[in-house]
Image: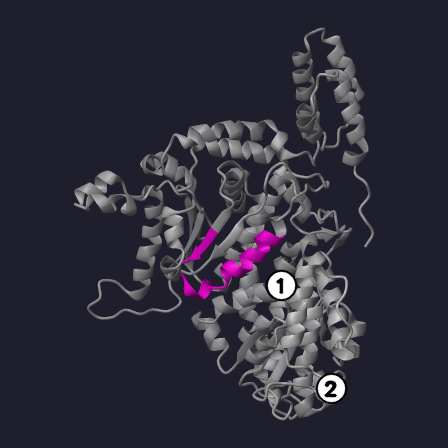
Amino acid sequence: MQAPAVSAVQQHRQHCLIAVTSAFGARLTTPAVAPVLRLTSGLLHNSCWSLRRQARKLGVNQRSRQAHAISQIRTEAMASEHALISESAAWEALKKHVKTIEGTHLRELLQDQERCEELIKEYDGVVVDLSRQRVVHETIIKLLKLAEEAKLKEKIDKMFDGEHINVTENRAVLHAALRAPRDEVINCDGQNVVPSVWEVLDKINSFSDQIRSGSWLGATGKPLTDVVAIGIGGSFLGPLFVHTAFQTEPTCALAAKGRRLRFLANVDPIDVARALADLQQETTLVVIVSKTFTTAETMLNARTVRTWITSALGTEAVSKHMVAVSTNLKLVKEFGIDPANAFGFWDWVGGRYSVCSAVGVLPLALQYGFGNVKKFLEGAWSIDDHFRSAPLGRNLPVLLGLMSVWNVSFLGCPARAILPYCQALAKLAPHIQQVSMESNGKGVSIDGVPLPYGTGEVDFGEPGTNGQHSFYQLIHQGRVVPCDFIGIIKSQQSVYLKGEQVSNHDELMCNFFAQADALAFGKTREELLAEKVPEELIPHKMFSGNRQSLSILLPNLTPYTVGQLLALYENRVAVQGWIWGINSFDQWGVELGKSLAGKVRTQMNAARTKGKPLSGFNYSTTTLLTRYLQGKTQLLYPDPHDVFPTNILPGHEK
């Protein structure tokens, strides 16, 4: 891929250095130059040389000239779309405001009813409660000013307008178009992409109906009742999250009766064994998800499962039992799949944002019917439309994103716990890990300038109440970890036992409400003394409180609200990236490891087949790789036949 053109930042950097040092004179030290150079990261539309002339005309002392020049550079730099936000007046104001917040405690803040009312927002049935965040009215005003200086509204509009905001890959970012209504207009490169999206959706609708109705039969004439979706990263985590959320929803469960959907992602052969366990080739349909049809792990798994199918049904069965989500029709055909059975998507769909494309819609529609998946898309669009149109101060994804920026960049809390009090959301945290950490785990600005502040969050989580018996100890009495509590008003399943105080779901939700208050209020020494706790135990039983969280309350967990929840997090992550001035839509950090794995693969093959010694690795890698090669049961290359566990493919074990 061609490297992006040198930006105006790099072009002006040297000129800025000369101009600034000329204005300040020789007494300007290196530490003083550094912040000035960071200020020049924006596209300075006025000549930096004018700063030198103006500074010398001041006729004041050196320090005044320096302060005046810095002020002017800041003003001009912040006029740029790509200026470092940390040099803005709003950022500085928030840094100073931290001292005000440090003098408060959530015990007192939560007594202010007017404040709490201001911080509880609702849209289309979704309630977001920010009252347990360490913020006051002034904090919100300052954060909205930060959003204004970051040109957040303009950036939201540019995304929906199809501009190529993923500058390092020269691509638009239009996953919102994947769930847009049929009559919506969303342009990319001068063309409305919504009709092409619906062309694929209509094709999925027709195909999934054929499979589910039994009009499409396998090679032996039997209906295909089991689906194995092969993908990795966003091609796996997003669809798995939605599948897990749908499984126990009554309407979806009824639609999926008699059918099974499994996912195969890891190249570890154990994952293959688990995905294929108890399945029969003659009733299995395989969906291979790879845009280029070259993804190493996915294609190795695809070839493995193809062997599993052809060993029982013959090579001709591939066209009946395997379909693709890909745009590389040439490789799809060479693999043995009819190109007519390939479902496309577009360069403007990032992998971690692809669950609403054929990547997720196809396997989910095969399992639950297209109608249920369509409701999921409608829920996601509900939040997308709100995101692009609502004022920033009433915009749920914007407010959530600003809270994350506040916690990470100003309160020094780089982690976040995602805590859904709903077992059906068990795979939400792993999916958001990728959406958030792959998007915002960056160290340079969108212009390639090293950032003087950290970005991104370390995301983890587990459904309540399981997490309470795992890692909540740390978030109550150890490190401060902002928490997202997610609750459901009406459970997918109802259980109430005669004689119990509350239903099973009510018991779950008692903990949902209690944990947020426990983090906020804590428990004081005085309260413990009143409970007659022994003096020696008081330090161990005290809770400092003042640990921020937010709560998201959904009316139920249906395909529609699952879509809302997904879009809420996707757009929140984008807001954070835009404020931090990074590209949330590329992922160059995954490339280096893949490249190095290729070197290991080459030498491993040479060692296995020709007995060649290892070379070119560091001492540690050489030692461990040698131990690995010596300790593993040897396979002879080329082997006379394929090798499979006997429980997957009898007669092919080694």
Check if residue 208 falls in the magenta segment. no
Secondary structure, magenta segment, majority class: helix
User: Residue 178, percent across and down?
Assistant: 64, 59
Q: Which residue is mark 2?
A: 639
Res 194 visible: no
Callout in the foreground (1, 2):
2
Q: Which residue is mark 1?
A: 233
Disc 1 versus disc 2: distance between alpha carbons? 31 Å
Q: Which amino acid, by three-letter code, is at mark 1?
A: Gly
> Which span of residues is magenta-colored?
417-438
Q: Residues within 10 Å of mark 2 (few under 14, many from 20)?
A: few
Outermost top residue: 59
Q: Is residue 625 above or below residue 40?
A: below
The residue lying at 36 percent from left, 48 percent from top is 476
User: Residue 389, percent across and down?
Assistant: 58, 44
Q: Taking 474 as reference, is 199 left or right?
A: right
Res 117 visible: yes
Q: Earlier in the sequence, mark 1 or mark 2?
A: 1
Instruction: State which quadrant residue 622 falls in.
Output: bottom right
User: Residue 3, percent across and down?
Assistant: 81, 49
Label pair 1/2, CB-CB below 8 angstroms:
no
Q: Which amino acid, by three-letter code, is at mark 2?
A: Asp
Q: Taking 374 as reference, is 492 left or right?
A: left
User: Residue 311, percent across and down?
Assistant: 68, 90
Q: Residue 144: give its label.
A: none
The residue lying at 44 percent from left, 71 percent from top is 248
Q: Is residue 477 above or below residue 73?
A: below
Q: Taking 516 as reference, is 412 left or right?
A: right
The residue lying at 31 percent from left, 70 percent from top is 495
